[in-house]
Image: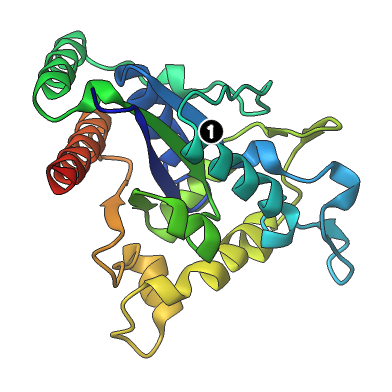
Amino acid sequence: MTSKRTFLVGISGASSSGKTTVARLVNSLLPNSVLIHQDDFYYPDDKIPYDEARGESNWDSADAVDFPKLIHTLKEIKADPETVYHVDSLELDDHKKFSLDENFVEAMKTFVSEQEKTNGLDNVRIVILDGFLLFNNTEVLDLLDAKFFFTAKYQTLKDRRAARHGYNTIAGFWVDPPNYFDNFVWAEYFLNHKHLFKKDTADLETHVKETGGVIATSEIQQFQNENDTNVDQLVSSVIKAITRKIGDITLDSI
């Protein structure tokens, strides 16, 4: 009998790119899967970097996240598939506003059931990590078995972010102050991810704003998620990519 193993999936992208929604829906359709939110590894509110010039806390800085704790947790889970992970998540449960088609859900359940029989999926604990700063941290990147990056145009992201009511924090509730998206969300997103994009233009930031950009490495699979993108298709594509990767690893181990 083959021992159970952990398969670690990273779903990242800009704030409001749809990564958390898709991660939750994928988690709901994959049996024996666990979902971990990077946002649950924020430092306490009083430890969040403070921008003196703008007089605001910078929740989008890499220094706002307790990466040593996150990496330790991922290593524990990867080393022992039986490790129990549970936190009272701060993430708002807003993915239920997306109602997957019942026929699609049944089709995906059938697909997953077939994969359990043919590629060893039933012997794998799938751990899904979602977060906006996964791929700029090399230690996290090295731990991931599959990497998915969600992109969208600047205006799409800004409009979606503006439609949100706010965010739970350890100490309370955070609401974006005026100009927060431009000063912090977008600025930190581009700063921390510009190395991932193909640099085929003199003004890379404008190109990424207008198009969403193109990821330069095949190691990371990119999904463009605009307002007219079909969520069912995104979920299906991610699940099929995960099971295909698990099947490839299973074949390699024979």
> Is residue 136 something one can see in this rendering?
no
Q: What residue sits 49% from the left and 39% below the top?
A: 79
User: Would residue 41 be found to the left or right of residue 117 on screen?
Assistant: right
Q: Which amino acid lies under the numbered mark 1 shown in the image of this protein? A: Ile
Which residue has dot 1 on it? 36
Q: How many marks?
A: 1
Where residue 65 appears, as percent x and y from the top left, is 70, 51
Secondary element at tag 1: strand
Tell me the quarter of the image containing the N terminus: top left
Relative to 250, residue 106 above or below = above
Which residue is most to the bottom? 202
Q: Front-most of 119 and 193?
A: 119
Relative to 177, residue 127 above or below = above
Q: How is the image coloured?
A: rainbow
Quarter location, residue 124: top left
Q: What residue sits 62% from the left and 56% below the top?
A: 181
Relative to 185, residue 107 above or below = above
Q: Front-most of 212 and 228?
A: 212
Which residue is most to the front? 1
Q: What residue sits 73% from the left and 60% below the top?
A: 63
Where residue 216 appears, as percent x and y from the top left, is 29, 72
> Is residue 252 something one can see in this rendering?
yes
Where residue 234 appears, as percent x and y from the top left, is 25, 37
Where residue 18 appears, as percent x and y from the top left, is 42, 40
Q: Front-most of 232 and 183?
A: 232
